[in-house]
Image (cartoon, rainbow, N blue to C red):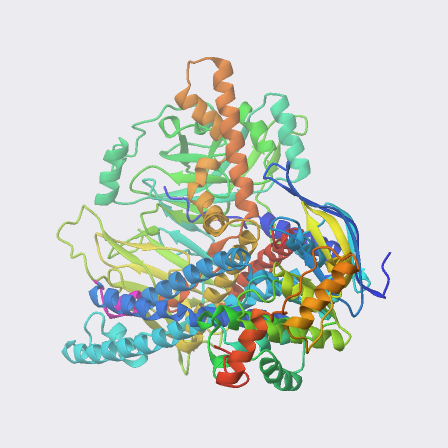
Amino acid sequence: MSLDFFPIADAPTASLAIGWIALAVAVIAGLAVGFNDVRRFKLRRIWALSGICFTESMRRRVWLVTPLAIVGVIIVSQLQRATDHQDAIRQTAKFCVFASGLVVVSTALILACTNLPREIESRVIFTIVTKPTTRLEIVIGKVLGFARVTAAVLLIMGIFSFSYLEVRNHARMQMVREQLVDVAPDGAGRTTLAHYADHGFLQTRSFNYPVDLNIYSRLPSDKMKWMRGGTSQFFISHFAPTEEERAVLEAAAQQNAEVDILTTLRVNWLPVTPEEQTEAVRLGIPPLHPQPVVPFGPSRTAQTAPVFVTEFKALLQFRLVNEVGGNVVKPEDIGAKSDGALIDNTSNGTPGCIQPVAAKAVRQLSELPEFWVDVSGVTPGTEYGAGPLPVVLYIPAANNGAGMVIRPPAVAGHPEAPKFLSRSAKYGMLVVGAAKEGHSVAEFSFRGAASSAGSGDKVAFQLDAQLERTGDYNDVPSGDSICQVNVVNARTGRNSGPILVSPELGHLTFFDVPAEDAAGGDFDVQLRGLMEGQWIEVRPASVALITTEQSFAVNLFKSFFLLWMLSILVIAISVFCSTFLSWPIAVVVTLILLLGRWGVIQMGDTLNPGVGHTVAADFFAGKDAAETKAVSSAVEALSKALRTIAVVLPDVSEFPASEDLERGISIPLSVLGEAAESLLIYGVIVIVGGYIILRFTEAAP
Amino acid sequence: MATADYAVQIEDLTKVYKDFWGRDKVRALDGLNLTIPRGEVFGLLGPNGSGKSTTIKLLLGLIFPTSGRACILGQPAGNTSINERIGFLPEESYLYRFLNGEETLRFYGKLFKIPRKELNRRVPALLDTVGLDAKSRKRKLREYSKGMARRIGLAQALINNPDLILLDEPTTGLDPIGTREMKDLILSLKAQGKTVLLCSHLLADVQDVCDRITILYAGKMQTLGQVKDLVEVRGITQVQCQGLDAEKIREVQEFLTRLGAKDSVITHPTTTLEDLFMRVVRENSGNGAAKGS
């Protein structure tokens, strides 16, 4: 199961805080070393020094890299294999930004790394430092000078990119208009084609995204929410025990006492679908229906507690997980599927089960500030219904045997509702297509969305979902699909009624909804696949409300501005490195500093704490204990060092120039702000570092 | 120590170059003590490796002393603010070769925050002073001959109208006319009350313009004094006069012998090759024809 859709906690902002602290330290150190130089700081001198860098670069014809990049973009975009018109424009935009980024970063790197060492080697620096020029002005002058060069390069590339994309867009729009003539008025995809014919492909939109996505087996009614059995769907309940509750948990652990997961669910028996049949066979679970018996699983004392009267039984599977879906307690300590809990559909209307958690796992729980109980319905052809509080933790030994219940944390006075999810495929979570209700429906919840979005009486939505065909319906076409969308206004209760949408494989789809259904900004978009044998893969951002349409030129400018900021960071680091290294080494070190963090991130889980133990266990199992321990410690230390480096180094992914532009999304100002913040922190630190090094380095060694 | 009356004050200045590991490699300057009053043209002489360039670099703050102190115009050497009043012509013209002569001077002028209006006046005047004509001042420095490069180098050293000018081998690469002009310029700077510290191998040039000199060897000062005192050959008397024919010369020689003079030699004085060259060029090409070539 993919873990993409767990409620991931905010990433720690430790590196940012460290960055600001480092910036403050650097500024203080700079002032301590060169307060007089700061006092002598003159913009005119800096501008003159930067002018020299700019003039030199221009007279060395650095700008000649731009025609090369332009030719490259034209050739590659002519050879591209696009899936459709939009894809062709997207790819071209990506090539333009990529080529511009490549050219500007490599130019900045080479120029800035070689300049100072060359001036020292040729002794031109003699005539600069013997003037009333401070080392601080020299460093800043060079950074500014090469920033002017990269701005010029980006200006050329920007003008080309805009012109070239406009030309291609015009040609593609003409082709779409010709295509529209041949498409029937109610033909699949006509809406999308008409949208492109009207708006073109160089769109820049702002979106409002849902605050929540739940996937149920059918639309929630009253207070019940439903999930399908066969492990295709599950829900997670959030627990964040208070200090007092954690103390009780710890006391229970010390007494070697169990903790129970109390689950209350309703059960509906449904016809088994072909997918469920296949899945049941794969999992070794024979279909339960139509006979209402218990064909598998041992009956355990705890599961047949006297509060429940058994009529029908269906399996549940439990996990205790963290914010990204990883187990926080070994599955065997809460019962694996083979001996999973049984839910009893009682005659007195109180269905549920008690799932004990082994005493040794209770201590682990007591140490966690928060965790989630993951509940899957295992039995195929079964629908599990959950109320507002389907899961609680029960500590029988607490309060001198009177017991204690731990509930999910309160949100707006009520226990936090469980989150319903479904099994994930490559792109997203699966919404199973079916002509009838009762299988799968995704509910995208918008809260506080732009209520004035769209023009006139309609608001527009973008659907970005993938289609997949199940192996059980070989005669089903794999191309277009039909989905049903309902928009329910959470304030007024108004329902738009079914809106049919035809998503195409690998394409964006657009649909309009009456504006009053989204009025107020609080509404739910319910999406259901109508095609048997097709899965729709969705993510939380798969449905987006289009709030504004902006100028593509402005977005392109933002994209190139991000590239410019990145180039300044490259220049600052390059100048810093060139103050104490020969230029070839400076190039290498600059690249390491720039890409180090990215490289560590690419190593992913490999560097998680405990990797030393894993490596030692995998490769040195059964060998000398001291040797194994040494390997484990060394790998752990290396892993820790790399993680530390990752925190300290700049993050080039904070300069995402092409991603949003390519997707036609307006680059948020917050992205520019984050990039500027990163540039400010690292730029100032390396400039001060370069200044201090130059200040104490002889200009004529 | 620093006294405003002195343009340069050096006290026990020592510079030891070290290798990568911090071990002593070369003792380039060893306890140098020197003072140069304002308004003097001072010559720093010595063979290669004697410590001349090291001394200049230390005075300019291009390198840091191992021990000792140096002051320029009353302030510690290497102080950025004092660079406002210093002009420096390095041994080779280390300038941006992609700029032309005029751009070069404007660039260095901006580093001194000279107002644009003043630069518009000063740049052409300086280019005229160093003998770069209108055509050559628009050419890139990479196209300059060595002599032209020295001229533009000198111009950049004077762009700020400095009080102290450090000239490292100023006549290297110059033709005799250029050399003469350089010497004339140095003398005119002296006349303006400026201090010039001259470092050269060409002893004749030094002798022509310097008030005082010092000779360095192995990083130590070997001699210091007025040029005329140092070069005077005591014990030999020279008499110059006009209008004597061969007979009279013979009588003078006999008279000298009677007075007890030993090894007396009576010859005709010779001019210097520089004077001869200057006269020939003037007669054939007119004044300044070779400028800027």
Rendered image quadrant of residue A495: bottom left
Q: Position of residue A550 (x, y in %)?
A: 43, 77
Q: Is residue A209 above or below residue A697?
A: below
Q: Is residue A643 above or below residue A294?
A: below
Residue at the spot x=61%, y=33% of the render?
Answer: A367
Q: Is residue A259 above or below residue A75?
A: above
Q: Position of residue A534 (x, y in %)?
A: 23, 54
- Is residue A436 rendered to the left or right of residue B103? left
Task: Confirm whether the magenta stretch covers residue A89.
Answer: yes
Q: Is residue A387 visible?
A: no
Q: Quadrant of the N terminus of chain A?
A: top left
Predominant secondary structure, magenta span: helix
Residue range in magenta is A81-92
Q: Position of residue B145 (x, y in %)?
A: 47, 71
State the residue in front, A273 or B260.
B260
Q: Is residue B138 visible?
A: yes
- Is residue A569 rendered to the left or right of residue B66? left
Residue at the spot x=52%, y=55% of the render?
Answer: A121
State the residue in front, A159 or A500.
A159
Residue at the spot x=42%, y=13% of the render?
Answer: A622
